[in-house]
Image (tube, helix red, strand yellow):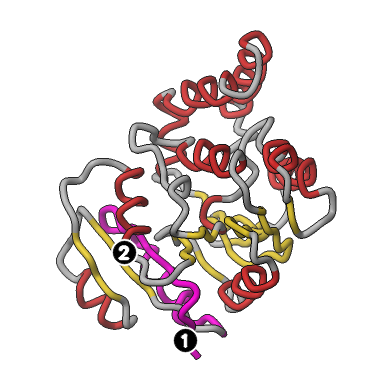
Amino acid sequence: MKNELHSFVVPVYGQSPYLRECLESLRAQTLRSPIVISSSTPYEGLRALAEEFDARLVLHSPNAGIGRDWNFALSQSTTPWATVAHQDDLYLPTFAERTVAQIKASSSAVLVLTGYAELFDGQRRANSPMLLIKRILLELGFLGRERAETVKAKRRTLWFGSPIPCPSVTLSVSRAAARFREDLKVNLDWEAWLRLASEEGAFAYDREILMLHRIHASSQTSAAIHDGVRSREDLMMFESIWPPPIARILARAYTFSYETGQAS
């Protein structure tokens, strides 16, 4: 059964070896959602792949970075809610069904997130020190509840970083704040969540693990750690939340965690 409330939008960059697996996981949902593939870097075979999975393919130009790709993909959604499905990741069969249930349960929701596990070297990793830290940070705002309703509660989840896993997030497309800054390369999701947190509307949280986020050396995040972009953007974000001395301490702690391989 298809639904008219939610869709998956898949921004495709380059030729990912994992895209087929991602699309297979979207087609295998217990509640079928429309699939839109968008790309500013199309390649031979992409249209045939889209047709195979009954997905609508939309091309755009120029290739202007990840923020532009995500924003364009969201603009192509024909449903009021959309998940920006990352091309390397996998979505478990009840992701759409449970996400839609969260949307229907809260008329005030503007963002729905789910639990997730990591996929590393083909192995599912549901527990790690970093995943544990992120779950703890989320509870600063949710406090065991399924909703974070107030501005203060929503912002608390983002005080020490962004534990809200971008590929598991489903957004209310009509919200202007549900768009990404196109000058950022890594923390564009954290910055967007902070803007959404400052507006009316609840964040809804399904703690069940409903998707798998792939960790690999060629990912955008891994590249940004190595070239220093992530450290600079971390400092910028912490300075928007904390006084400068505290912001510098937190940013340095994050940099140390990247250098020692404790964060990804």
Residue 100 higher or lower than 169, as above or below = below
Q: Residue at x 76, y 60 (%)?
A: 146
Q: Measured from the top left, where is residue 29 in percent x and y?
A: 53, 81
Quick one: SS at disc 2? loop
Asked if residue 232 lies left or right of residue 145, the reply is left
Q: Measured from the top left, where is residue 238 in percent x and y?
A: 59, 23
Asked if residue 71 lies left or right of residue 249, the reply is left
Identity, as a three-letter code, of the amino acid under mark 1: Lys
Front-lying residue, 248 or 256: 248
Q: Residue at x 70, y 40 (%)?
A: 157
Q: Measured from the top left, where is residue 89 in percent x and y?
A: 48, 61
Q: Residue at x 58, y 78 (%)?
A: 93
Q: Measured from the top left, where is residue 65 in percent x and y?
A: 29, 41
Residue 161 higher or lower than 43, as above or below = above
Going from N to C along the chain, the mark reached first, 1 or 2, is 1
Quarter location, residue 240: top right
Q: Residue at x 44, y 71 (%)?
A: 7
* Residue at mark 1: 2
Front-lying residue, 20 or 81: 81
Residue interval drawn in magenta: 1-30
* Residue at mark 2: 76
